[in-house]
Image: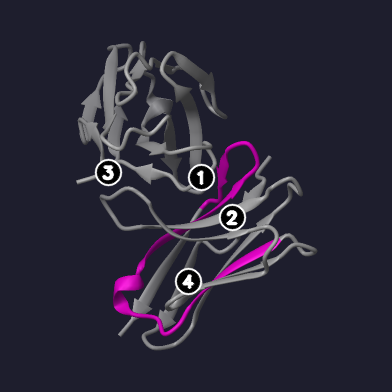
Amino acid sequence: EAQVTQNPRYLITVTGKKLTVTCSQNMNHEYMSWYRQDPGLGLRQIYYSMNVEVTDKGDVPEGYKVSRKEKRNFPLILESPSPNQTSLYFCASSPGRMGNEQFFGPGTRLTVL
Amino acid sequence: DQQVKQNSPSLSVQEGRISILNCDYTNSMFDYFLWYKKYPAEGPTFLISISSIKDKNEDGRFTVFLNKSAKHLSLHIVPSQPGDSAVYFCAARAQKLVFGQGTRLTINP
């Protein structure tokens, strides 16, 4: 089954404790992206990747890091999480251009205390 | 700077009637528009799209209309069904996708 998977689905952590949210897709898509969803703000792009070893900042990259060492995986790293990073996070992938139809993962709800 | 706006946070419609969700944008460079549907505890899923060279695209009960002069996009669902209750996001593409804030649609039996 073609899908985007994210882990963990739910995470409660404390300020400053490094964490990684994993994302994997099995559709051989070149493009992958991370979004955060906040009430009243919709989906905002954090980082994106056009291919292996090619990543770039989205609209709200502060406090986040990413890496793309393999085509299928695109982890999101929070080196020192803060409460304002409490949010619902989605990973997405798409074939071709980044602006094409994207396939989203199920989401990770992160709470930073 | 919100380039894509969905000004109605919520919409309630009777089952069987038409649901109309609206979206406005400011960037005239957008060349492709999409609608996504999101159920609770799931990621958004693609619903329907339209190129900027068209003014209408239809797929079953779903029709998207594009008015470029007004920079306005709308999604019509007819007839509305209880399973259509979800949050709907419009998105527009320049070099990347820009999403609106979402509209929560509730279909009442």
Say whether residue B93 is magenta.
Answer: yes
Which chain letter goes with mark 2? Answer: B
**Share a chain, discs 4 and 1?**
no
**Share a chain, discs 2 and 1?**
no
Given the image, on which type of amino acid does mark 2 rest? Answer: Phe
| Label drawn at residue A100 | 1
The magenta stretch spans which residues?
B72-101
Q: Quadrant of residue A66?
A: top left
Describe residue A26's horizontal placement relative to residue B94 as left or right: left
SS category of the residue bearing label 2: strand
Q: Disc 3 vs disc 2: Cβ atoms closer than 8 Å?
A: no
Mark 3 vs mark 2, CA separation in Å = 22 Å
| Badge 2 density bin: few <14, some 14–19, many ≥20, Cα 10 Å | many
In the picture of the structure, the residue carrying the numbered disc 3 is A106
| Badge 1 density bin: few <14, some 14–19, many ≥20, Cα 10 Å | many
Residue A7 drawn at (x, y percent): 21, 30
Residue B89 drawn at (x, y percent): 48, 55
Location of residue A59 with respect to A92 vertically, above or below: above
SS category of the residue bearing label 1: loop
Given the image, on which type of amino acid does mark 1 rest? Answer: Asn
Location of residue B74 with respect to A88 vertically, above or below: below
| Label drawn at residue B11 | 4
Given the image, on which type of amino acid does mark 4 rest? Answer: Leu
Which chain letter goes with mark 3? Answer: A
Residue A17 drawn at (x, y percent): 27, 12
